[in-house]
Amino acid sequence: MTESRQRVTVLGSTGSIGVNTLDVLARHPDRFTVFALSGHSRIDLLFTQCLAHQPEFVVATEPHAAAQLQSRLAAAGSQTRVLLGHEALDEVAAHPDVDMVMAAIVGAAGLSSCIAAARAGKRLLLANKEALVVGGAFFMDVVRAGNATLLPIDSEHSAIFQSLPTDRVLWPSVVDKIILTASGGPFRTRDPATLSQVTPAQACAHPNWSMGRKISVDSATMMNKALEVIEAKFLFGLDPSRIDAIIHPQSVVHSMVQFVDHSVVAQLGVPDMRGPIAYGLSWPQRIASGTTALDFSAMTGLSFETFDSPAHRARFPGLRLAWDALRSAPGTTAVLNAANEIAVAAFLDTRIRFDQIHAVNQATLEGFAVGAPGSLPDILALDEEARAYAQQLVRGFAR
Ligand code: NAD
Ligand code: MG
């Protein structure tokens, strides 16, 4: 019985995607067992998750948190072993006893553990889009060399994956373009001239999705869509000119594929990440996800709006940086991601204004020279240098 269950490591289990993943896993105790969890903060939640799911290992990336967790688990008589630090993330991602890894850490901090899972040939469920944006072609090479199975968890990419033919050899010849949908975020109708005044709380108040703070800010600037364009390029191997984005405020159509005959296949559902998570966990089968069904009788309409209007270009100047970065030297997408992580953190700390996030991203892309990274250490060094460059720009802007 136990041997037939899939053993899952959930990296970033205390985050929004992590919590949703554990919710889906708990619905299928006959199919899955939790091998390892990880968290950076929110130790109370990590402790509760350990008691509920009884993993073999739990990784705490902060020393203080690890010590606290260790004593609390010991006092509770738990068998779960506590590991400390980022190297331990790689260990539980690549461990021989693991079948699947949910990569749900936010930012480039998750790259190394994704690479470790891919090298070890795991089924890698990728929510952590920044890891692929940073790792780029190198990441995809490791997936191929490791014979890993990379499945998208981002709702748009899951939708595209569900809409494409099963035989990926066909993709380049049958796809005309893929169309990523975007809700438009909290500022879709806001006067662009007032974006300099928005607060972190306003930027994090997403109309349709409940998510972590970093991706919420990215959804407000539309950098989330820019990262997703880059993610799509690497996942599906399409030329950037075949990737498009459109606003769809209801978030019911999760994305679409237009084929060369102009037939369009879309995937629909309620905006609930447990849908794509359950698909990644069960592919090519399907399992119950816990989401509600779409109620077509209650739907008042599905609308779409182009990004290509003067108002949206002014509101969301960051979107086009995706194509700029993809057309530049390899490694430029890592630089864009590094700048954006620094800028978003500075905005959430109220050190820069909302509109200055784009200024930092653009100035870093323009001012920072990129050498082509060929290995994980190269990529991590590039990430660090680009962060330092962006940090300096932030200090220049600081109020
Ligand atoms: P979150 O902030 O809610 O959770 C992030 C997780 O990563 C937490 O467990 C946190 O402890 C851990 N973490 C943070 N910094 C870390 C570090 N330096 N080292 C190790 N662990 C660290 O974020 P989220 O909303 O769950 O998003 C996770 C990833 O999934 C992001 O890449 C995001 O873009 C992507 N994603 C999220 C959603 C969503 O609906 N939330 C949808 C699509 C994609
Ligand atoms: Mg998405």
Image (cartoon, rainbow, N blue to C red):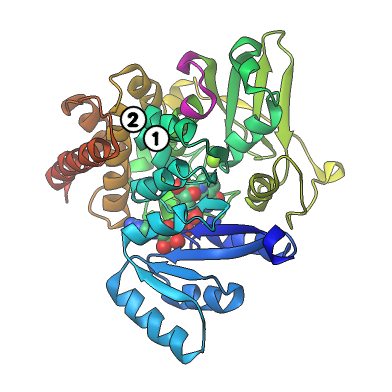
* 189 relative position to 385: left or right: right
Q: Quadrant of residue 297?
A: top right
- Locate residue 352, reporting x and y percent: 24, 48
Disc 1 marks which amino acid? Val
- Asked if marks 2 and 1 touch (Cβ < 8 Å), the reply is yes
Q: Nearer the viewer, residue 358 or 29?
A: 29
* 84 relative position to 26: left or right: left
Number of the label disc, if any, that sits on residue 133: 1
Magenta stretch prevailing secondary structure: helix
Number of the label disc, if any, that sits on residue 333: 2
Q: Which residues are magenta?
A: 234-241
Residue drawn at (25%, 34%) of the image: 359
Question: On screen, 238 above or below 74?
Answer: above
Could one spot residue 158 in this view of the protein? yes
Q: Residue furthest bottom?
A: 75
For label 1, count other residues whose C-alpha is less than 10 Å away and answer few (under 14), some (14-19) or many (20+).
many
Residue drawn at (28%, 45%) of the image: 343
Q: Nearer the viewer, residue 291 or 253?
A: 291
Q: Quadrant of residue 155?
A: top right
- Locate residue 265, reporting x and y percent: 73, 24
**Residue 245 painted magenta:** no
Label tally: 2
The local secondary structure at tag 1 comes to helix
Q: Quadrant of residue 17?
A: bottom right
Q: Is mark 1 within 8 Å of ligand 1?
A: no
- Locate residue 191, reporting x and y percent: 43, 36
Residue drawn at (76%, 35%) of the image: 301
